[in-house]
Amino acid sequence: MKLTERKEKIIQAVIDSYTESCEPVSSADIKAKYIPSLSTATIRNELAALEDMGYLDQPHTSAGRVPTANAYKLYVEKLMPRKELSSSELDIIKKYFNNTVLEIGDLLRSTAKVISEITNLAGIAYVKNIGSAIIKNIKIIKITDTLAIIVIVTDRGVLKDSTVTVSEEMSEDYLRSASEFISKVFANHTILEICNPDEIINQITNEFRMVFDAIVEVLKNYVSDDSGKEIVLEGGSKLLEQPEFSTIGKARAVYEMFESKEKLAPVLKNEDFGLTFNITEDVNKPECAIVTANLEAHGVNIGKAGVIGPIRMDYPKIVSVLDYIGKTVGNLVDNDKK
Amino acid sequence: MKLTERKEKIIQAVIDSYTESCEPVSSADIKAKYIPSLSTATIRNELAALEDMGYLDQPHTSAGRVPTANAYKLYVEKLMPRKELSSSELDIIKKYFNNTVLEIGDLLRSTAKVISEITNLAGIAYVKNIGSAIIKNIKIIKITDTLAIIVIVTDRGVLKDSTVTVSEEMSEDYLRSASEFISKVFANHTILEICNPDEIINQITNEFRMVFDAIVEVLKNYVSDDSGKEIVLEGGSKLLEQPEFSTIGKARAVYEMFESKEKLAPVLKNEDFGLTFNITEDVNKPECAIVTANLEAHGVNIGKAGVIGPIRMDYPKIVSVLDYIGKTVGNLVDNDKK
DNA sequence: CTTAGCAATCAATATTAATGAGTGCTAATA
DNA sequence: TATTAGCACTCATTAATATTGATTGCTAAG
C-alpha cells in the first residue's frame, strides 16, 4: 500500500502526541489536536491501514495507536522538523566547556553530562581506539623527591596524567632531557606503535632507557584497558523520570544494562551516525533507543557521543544537540579558549 | 524500664533477621532462629516492652516487629560484632588504588567506587575545605605553542591540572623559572592565603607577574567551587536492588536527593565518625542512613568517605570497610606505590 | 515469671462487578 | 470511490467485596 501524504501526516500526529503524553493516541485525539478536517472514522480507517503497514501498533483492541520503531525511523529520516538550539541551551554547553577541559577523560565526562542536562536523558560518550592516537609531546615532571608526573599530549587531547616513582638521583634536568629526547623519538607515532617498539627501540640510547621503559609501560596501560572502561555514562537517573521506566522492574533492567557497559560497546562502535532501537532484549523490555553522533576534536574523529532514552524521545532536539556537540566540542576545548 | 541482657539479645535478633530479610520479625521467627529456649509468648511480652521503650516498631497490629533508628544506634554503639575485611575485599580495594591515583578528584572517585562495590550500596566521598590545603610545589609546563598545563602539588595530593593559554613568546625556560620562583613564594602557604595575596603580592617581581596572576586565577577557581561540587557519589544504582527502594516513588526520592548534593553537604560536614538516620524527610520517606568516616592522606584529614543506603544495612561490614579505607587510602596512594 | 490457647486484627490476595475509552464494521451520503 | 455517522463490541482500569493467613494481645493456668 502506498504511503500517502495524509498517512505521513497521521504518523507525524501520532508521534507528536505520543512523544508528549506517552499515551496511546486515539482517532479523536488526532482530529482534535492535529487534523480537524477529517472525521474520526476516516482517521480510524487510515490508522488501521498504517497498522497493517507496520508503522503503528495497538496495545489492545480498545486502545489508541502507538508508533512502532519503524515509524520512528521514518520520522527521523524524513518527517522530523529540524530544530535550532535555543540560546539558553547554547549557554549551558558553553558553561560546561569554558572551564579548561583538556584531558580526554574529562572531556568525555563533560560531554556526557551536558548532553544529559540538556536532553534530560542519559548521556553517553566514548573515545574509540585510543591506541591510534598520535603522540605529539611527552613531558615528565618531578613533583616530589620520588614522584614524577607523565603528561602525554596526543592529537586527541591530553591523556590523564600518570605518576611514576623515580629514584632521587634522577634530577629534574635529567628528566627534562629525557622527555625532550623521548618526545622527539615518539612524535608522530601512534600509541600502539610505541607499545610494540621493535623498530624504534634501537634509537634509544642506554642513558634514557629506564625512563623510556616507564613510559611504554604507562602507554600500554591505556591500550590494554578492558572494553567498556572508555565509555562514560552520565545522568542515568534522569531516566527514572520517564514514564516508560516507571515500574521498578524496567528501571532495574535499564540500570543493569548500564552496569555492563561492554554490552553497549558493540552498539556504539557500529554505525556512523546512528539510531538504534530496542537495545535491551525481551523479558522486561524497557525498549530503549540510543542515538549517537561522531565526536570531533581538532579535525580528528575521536569517538562518539550520544543519548540513551526511551524510544519515545524528542528527536529534533536530540539530533540538534548531538550535531552541535559532536562538531564543536573539540574546538571549544582549544581554539575558543580565551 | 531496664534494658536487660535478654532484651538486648532480642533486639539483636530482630536486627539480624530484619537486615537479612527486610521483613518484620515475628516472635516465632525469633524462637526458631535465635532463642529456642523461650516460648513465643514470652518473646511477645518482651517485644511489647521493647516497643514501649522505643526500640521496636510495628507496621500494623498483625505484623511482626521492625527495628527503629534508636535500635540501630544501640546496635552500632554496643551490640554490633566487629568484623574483619575478607581477603577478597582487600584485593578489590588494592585493585582500585594500584593504578596510580594522585589527583584528588580521581582519589575521591576511586574511593566512592570501591566503597560502593564492596558494600553494594551508594558510595560517597568528599574533600573538605580545599582552601586550607598547603601548597608544596607548582609546575607550569608548556605543551603546545600556546597552551600550558599547571600542576599544583599540595599536602593533600595533586589538584586536577588546569590549562592556560600562554603567548608564544613565553619560552619553556621562562615558564620554568617562573614556576620555580612562584613555587618558592607559595610554598607552605594555603590556597586560601594565596587567593588573598595582599601580603605576598609584594614579593613578586614584575617579571613573573602575568604568570602569577594566572595561577592565582586557577586557585580561585578551586576555592570558589560551589558547594556540592566537591562531593562525589558513585554506584547510586545499586540502591535500586534494595527492597526498601522497590517502589518507583521511593527510588525517585532517593535520586532527587542525589541530584542536589548540596543538601547532603551539611550532613557530611557535621560529625566526626557518624551515623545519620532519616536523611530524607517525610512524604515518600525512603528512610536512608548515611555512615561516614574520616579520610586521611599523608596524615592529614582531607575529608570524608561514606555509604548511603537504607537504614537496614550490614553495619559490621560497612564500618570495617570505611575504617580501613579511611585510614589507608592516603598511604596506598603514595607510600605503597611500587 | 513463663507459657499454652484462643479470639481479634488487618495486610495481602483473589474474586467479581462496573465503567468507559476506543475501536471495527455497516450502511448511508457526497 | 472516498467519507462519515451510528452502534455494537472489546478489554484495560477501577472499584467493591470476600477470603486468607500471619501474628498479635490477652487470659488463665502452671
Image (spheres, coloured by chain):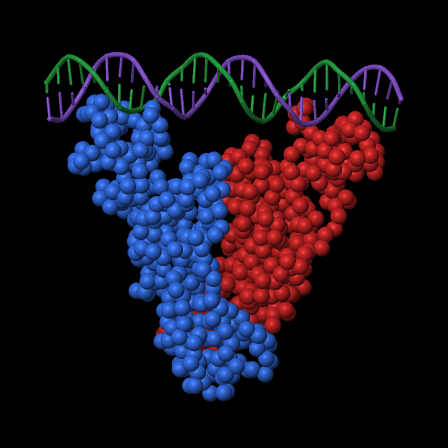
Chain colours: A blue, B red, C green, D purple
Q: Is residue B135 left or right of residue A17?
A: right
Q: Nearer the viewer, residue C8 or B150?
A: C8
Task: Look at 63% across and 45% down and name the residue there.
Answer: B290
Q: Nearer the viewer, residue A307 or B109?
A: A307
Q: Is residue C28 left or right of residue B289?
A: left
* Relative height, residue B42 to residue A311 (above, below): above
Asked if residue A146 can be seen in this view, the reply is yes
| Residue A11 picture location, percent across and down | 25, 35
Quadrant including the C terminus of chain B: bottom right
* Relative height, residue B62 to residue B25 (above, below): above
Report which quarter residue D9 is drawn in.
top left
Report which quarter residue B46 is drawn in.
top right
Task: Look at 34% across and 58% down and name the residue there.
Answer: A295
Report which quarter residue A296 is drawn in.
bottom left
Quadrant including the N terminus of chain B: top right
| Residue D22 picture location, percent across and down | 67, 27
Q: Is residue B311 left or right of residue B48?
A: left
Q: Is residue A164 left or right of residue B277?
A: left
| Residue A279 picture location, percent across and down | 39, 46
* Relative height, residue D28 to residue B137 (above, below): above
